[in-house]
Amino acid sequence: MQFNSLTFVVFFAVVVTLYYSLSSWTARKTILVVASYLFYAAWNPLFIVLLWISTIADWTIARRISATPDRVRKRLLVTLSLSINLGLLGYFKYGGFLLENFVSLMGGLGIEFVPPAASIVLPIGISFYTFQTLSYTLDVYRGRMQARYSLLDFSLFVSFFPQLVAGPIVRASQFLPQCVESRRATADSMGWGLTLMVFGLFAKVVLADSVLAPVADAVFGAPDTVGTFEAWLGVFAFSGQIFFDFSGYSTCAIGAAMCLGFALPDNFRSPYAAIGFSDFWRRWHISLSQWLRDYLYISLGGNRKGEVRTFVNLVVTMFLGGLWHGASWMFVIWGLLHGFYLVVEHAARTLFGGIAAFDSRVARVAFGFLTFIIVSMTWVFFRAADMGTAMTLLTTMTVPTGMGSLVFAEQLPAIILVLLGLVGWHWATRNSNLELLFERLPLWVRALVISTVVVSIIYSGGGAQHAFIYFQF
């Protein structure tokens, strides 16, 4: 069941109606938990068992961590939590990948190893809810939270359907306190929540799927047939596609949660107006980058143990961040490249940070443009099916050639308009947000915008169900 489906529209309407028809807060939370399990079961009912394992294990372990004063026992318990969660994630997400690489390694050593046939299906959303449940046991272990929440509250935190399968990755400290007292949306928050859902669907259905995806798919699907202009156009199209697709999901999730009276954290903040790569990761997939920073980078020592150790910690963090996205060396390369960029930026800031010219408006715009170009080129490894495709595209982009056999004459105006609008919008909203800007518009303008967006969704095939990109992670 996806946000961009008529089935979800009916499902959400029923859930909201039942939720607000009950007066008991416990009963309303129970409705949300049941609805969340039904939402998840629409993909594969058997994988609900994994949700239950993570939920019961971390809720129980956190209570025991909180109850014991023995530090050794606390460490053993948090290690158990890590083992269960990362064990499940490792088996389902990386089992086949590790086996495949082990077979290749044995082959390279002259040893023929034929493993038994195995078909491991990746449970949707496992990377997201695994990090969520771990945030609870880790925060309780560190003394940042008390394990005082009921199993019902914790079950709702783990399974909350608006953000269950593709984020944002919500911390226990952000969500669980909201479960204590009854939550109801005001008329204003209900209206804004529905508006966000419409905007999110517009970003996904119209901008990502209808305008940009066909070009990106054509270029990445036939890299040998494109010229330099088409290669750049396809790469920029994917830069726009992945933003509109993923931010569209996050916007829908935040809006749906708001309609139920819950607040979820922002996951994007004008990332294509980032000035440098540290700034980019403060603006792109914010919930993941903050999770990696707080629970991995800082745990490794952060920047507290000298520059060399800082560089190593940055690379290790981004390596694991790339691997989090999928069991593929292409994701690993993408993550390592971002780790390398962060190291270079950190070193450059140490060497040249005091030079006033680098803080001028012209320099900041230039660095922002350079950041966008490099980020877009790095997306090639994220999107390409294999290294051959990636290197062919990058070579075509950097070694000028003529026009290829793919022709986008009819789509070109719309593509360029969307891409320029995307980057321009990000720079215009770099230090603001959509809600503040929308509130400043006259009522009739807001109504016109929403009506135009709704008509565009319907005209573009609002009932079509193209999966969100981050569902595979």
Image: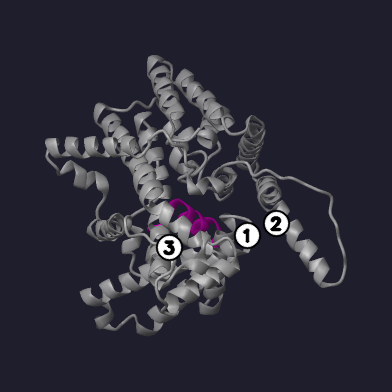
User: In this rendering, is residue 42 above or below 401?
Assistant: above
Q: Alpha-carbon neighbours of circle 3 within 10 Å: few (<14), some, or many (≥20)?
A: some
Residue at 34% over, 61% down: 272
Task: Please give left or right for residue 302 compared with residue 79 in the image.
Answer: left
* Amino acid type assigned to the residue bearing label 2 in the image: Phe
Q: Position of residue 394 (x, y in %)?
A: 48, 73
Measured Cα–Cα span from mark 2 to mark 3: 34 Å
Residue sitting at the far front? 405
Q: Position of residue 359 (x, y in %)?
A: 26, 76
Pointer 1 residue: 328
Residue at 35% over, 42% down: 200
Secondary structure under the numbered disc 3 in the rendered image: loop
Measured Cα–Cα span from mark 3 to mark 1: 28 Å
Q: Determine contact: label 3, label 1, CB under 8 Å.
A: no
Residue at 43% over, 49% down: 246
Q: Position of residue 455 (x, y in %)?
A: 27, 35
* Amino acid type assigned to the residue bearing label 3 in the image: Leu
- The residues colored magenta run 283-297
Asked if residue 266 shows in the view, the reply is no
User: In this rendering, is residue 366 above or below 432?
Assistant: below
Q: How many numbered marks, from 0 up?
A: 3
Pointer 2 residue: 97
- The colour scheme of the drawn protein is one colour
**Magenta run includes residue 419:** no
* Amino acid type assigned to the residue bearing label 1 in the image: Ser
Residue at 59% over, 48% down: 141
Secondary structure under the numbered disc 2 in the rendered image: helix
Secondary structure under the numbered disc 1 in the rendered image: loop
Pointer 3 residue: 406
Q: Nearer the viewer, residue 167 or 295?
A: 167
Asked if residue 309 shows in the view, the reply is yes
